[in-house]
Amino acid sequence: MTRLSIRERAIGMLLAGSSQRTVADTLGVTIRTVKNWNKKQKAGEMLNDKPRSGCPPKLSRVPKIIIRKSIGKRWHSTRKLAKYISSKYVAISKDTVHRYLHNSIGAKAYKRPSNPKLTEVQKSKRVKFCLEHKSWTSLDWERVFFSDESPFELFHPTNSQNDRVWDVSSRNITPVETVKNPPRLMVWGMMSHRGLSELHLISPRHSVNADYYINEILAKCCLPTYKRKKMRGPLTQRKLYRKISDTFFMQDGAPAHTAIKTQKWLSDHLPGFWAKDIWPSNSPDLNPIENLWAIMQAELDKRKPATNLKQLAKILENIWSGISPSILQNLIDGMPNRINSCIELNGEYIGK
């Protein structure tokens, strides 16, 4: 039965004395619908559908199947799918494919993440480390002081996925100015669940070898952090853990970190540290300070761009000192989940 014949039958039943409720229940429609049809009939309006604007749908069953099968596969852009379907079945545009993927399937286009390539040996060591610390709670991880270096670029390009401007013409959009091989500033920092070291700025004139790492970073920035007495105050001035003798210093496997002289300095000056064979190599996803660097970069992108390294350094120090205590606690609280995820993935990269 067509939609027009259903409407005509409804009007016939009403004229024969049936109630609107009876008509609605008999034809499987709402009372509001029956009322609207009756209103149209009394006004002398036609009961058939009004002409609709726009083109009828172009995607038939087979093109829809082809598009659905492209989900999760590489090299299946909307442009390529539209070109293939147009050559085999019906002429469509990439916008048609995009609408079907987005509106009908609920799919989105994602950039493939870049993950470190892990060898089988590295995966095995990651699983070993995680199994050894599987029973650790967030309270246990509060005893670990996580450290790392990170670069920050001058004129760093913003995330193109988020930096969108709506306008009637692309000619009205101010372009993003990029710099080839932009200057960058390397920084070092250390965090715990309740505090931060000072942010150490590494001059572009220096490379971080073992001597620089010991004399400029560990001796002048790391060690003073261990000697703090205040339990309150700014994050960059407070004590990082209530009982320093129970803590562990964590660093990754960079050559300057694993050098014999560095390991000896750590053994002589710190109450506890993870030797070079403990922390698994190529494991930034297990280090929560990596998330802290990402948070700083996101905040840096919101600020007025620095025009020189001196300005960049000042902005980074300002962002570092303004980090919320809740962020530090949340990152440490998430460590048991990181450990469990790495085990479940057999040592594969878990993301940050």
Image (cartoon, rainbow, N blue to C red):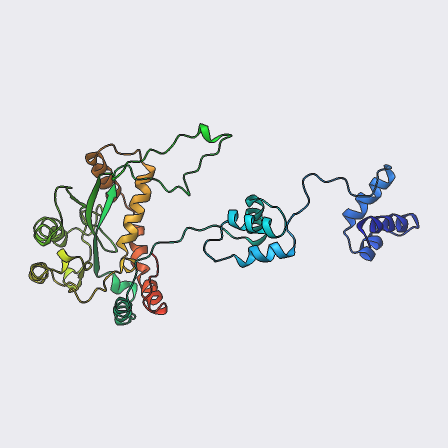
Query: In the rendered view of the protein, which quadrant contains the C terminus?
Result: bottom left
Describe residue 142's horizontal placement relative to residue 224 as left or right: right
Please say whether residue 102 is visible from this viewpoint.
no
- The residue lying toward the viewer, choosing from 253 and 132, is 253
- The residue lying toward the viewer, choosing from 333 and 158, is 158
Q: Is residue 147 above or below residue 176?
A: below
Which image quarter: residue 332? bottom left
- The residue lying toward the viewer, choosing from 23 and 101, is 101
Q: Is residue 242 above or below residue 8?
A: below
The x, y position of residue 180, in whole percent, is 27, 38
The x, y position of residue 79, in whole percent, is 52, 46
Describe residue 344's horizontal placement relative to residue 109 as left or right: left
Q: Is residue 141 above or below residue 326?
A: below
- The residue lying toward the viewer, choosing from 232 and 105, is 105
Going by the picture, which residue comes out furthest to the top?
A: 172
Going by the picture, which residue comes out furthest to the front?
A: 87
Which image quarter: residue 253? bottom left
Q: In this view, does 49 lie above or below 128?
A: above
Describe residue 48's horizontal placement relative to residue 54 as left or right: right
The x, y position of residue 127, in whole percent, is 29, 69
Query: In the rendered view of the protein, which quadrant contains the N terminus?
Result: bottom right
Describe residue 277's horizontal placement relative to residue 161 as left or right: left
The x, y position of residue 219, in whole percent, is 9, 51
Q: How many labels does the image show?
A: 0
Please say whether residue 349 is visible from this viewpoint.
yes
**Which residue shows up at 34% across the image and 38% down it?**
302
